[in-house]
Amino acid sequence: MRVFKKFPQPNTIKGQLHQVLVWITFITCLCIFIPTLYIEYRQTIQHQNEKMTHYLNAQSYFFESWLSERSNDIHTIANFDFVKDYNFQKSQKFFQDFKEKTNFTDLIFVNKEGIVQVDTVTEYSKNGASVDVNDRNYFQVAKKTKQPYITDILISKVTKQPIIAFASPILNVQQQFNGVVFGAVNLDIINQLLQESRVGFLGHAYIIDQEGTMLSGFNNKQQRSSGNYLVDDHILNAALKNKTSGLKLYKDANNKWVLAKSKPINGGKWFIISEIGLIEAYKPLINRILWITICLVVGSFFMIKMMLHLSKRIEEPIQQLLTGVRKVEQGFYEYQINDQQLTPYAQEFQELCASFNEMSDKVRKDTILLKELSITCQLTKLYNRRYLIEQGELAFQKCLEEQHHCSCIAIDIDFFKKVNDTYGHLIGDEVLKHVANIITNSVRTIDIVTRYGGEEFVILSPNTSLESAVNIAERVRQHVEDHPYIADFEINVTVSIGIAGYGDSENISTFYELLDKADQALYIAKESGRNQLRVCDKTGIVDRRQML
């Protein structure tokens, strides 16, 4: 029981005040926490994007330089005189010495018929000499274009291992094709270069070609031993689409969520992909949010303590004021609060007491005015929806009893949201008043014109046939179209209109059905292109007039 006494009942002034204070604290914390979380998140993503961009730029520069150097090496060798002269013995010795000083795992001399003449492979019992490589793409490209060429992954005919080949054609004095020199680099070399150049980056990086074949960064031994060098389709698609966009979120080959970014290299034939796990990427964000949360919790505790103390100081005078409000609510407008009872409290409460007493004198006079205001739209000075429901029902029942026609016209301003978005809500209010004045000046004195809500208006026309209502609606539509809103600029305004009439449709027997049919016709008018009217008659909703 002692625990419950510490907390006020929610239906008391004190309880309500405490609840409000707690909610204010909670909402304040949310207003601080949510934008802060969003800003911190955006900054983290931006920082990670910049970091990965710098890394990819450095890696791409490194690999482009490396590819260019290796390609130039092969091109230089292909232009040596002893190579052009088919001096195979000298070529064999030079190739072997040069291979030991570079990243090439093999250097091969191929004659113009596509037969290997020199091969530096030594770890196998038989090298590639006399092997026919005429069907190889690098041989055909070098023969056709007479230009250096870098291949994608291919399987060596001698080592049966995946390699990348740097090929350059051998041209004789007449610049005719006379063979090919190419250097092979296995994937371990590329993978090693990528790992050595990864300085200060915590994520995972690898290279793929446009087919999704991995050139480096194998995820596990099983993948390497099985010869499966293909990445998943979603990773390849992300790389193909990520040439100019930001970070991508997907699951990597180990089924873990990562942030990724890619950059094309080798003339767009390959991609360097950089990936970092979500936990690693968001770790700084998590730490900052944790500290912000702790600060908010501590701050909220002290804030609530201070507000509860303040609420205690204003609780009792509020009780006095609430008593006075109840009396006025019960109709005792002459009730006066004894200002002497509030003397111990703040001066503001005493002033509030005096103001309340003055207010109670005016309430009776204001009640009449408030009743009038309750049925009027203060912006357009038209009757509001409440008045339409009350008086429209009476007018409809009268037409029903006297067996007269009764029509309803529903009007909606076309693209009004665009007006608010373009010019602001103040201009939007002026456009509403402008259209309301046009409607008022376009109808008869017996018509009830109301602002039904938002940018929709309803005209109830007692003792009016459907054809007469159509004439009224068309007059309104034409006047709105012919009279744009003009201030320092001009806004062309159009309206869509739906019309229904009691006595002209078998499906209308109540005032609410009349409103509903007019609203349905309005919906069809807007869906059909706007700036037109639709009529609900005995055949359904039809197009009587359409002004496009």
Image (tube, rainbow, N blue to C red):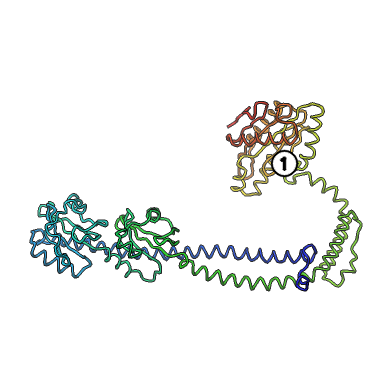
Quadrant location of the N terminus in the rendered image: bottom right
Q: Is residue 310 at least partly visible in the picture?
A: no
Q: Residue at x 74, y 71 (%)?
A: 308
Residue 162, image x, y percentages? 25, 60
Residue 328 appears left or right of 53: right
Q: Is residue 41 visible?
A: yes
Q: Amino acid at mark 1?
A: Arg
Foreground of the two, 428 or 130? 130
**Residue 503 in the image: x percent, y percent?**
74, 27
> Camera-side residue: 347 or 157?
157
Left or right of 216, for residue 306: right
Residue placed at 66% from the left, 70% from the top?
300
Name the residue beneath numbered marker 1. Answer: 451
Q: Position of residue 211 (x, y in %)?
A: 32, 53
Residue 321, x across and y down, in percent = 84, 63
In-image side of 446 versus 160 (left or right): right
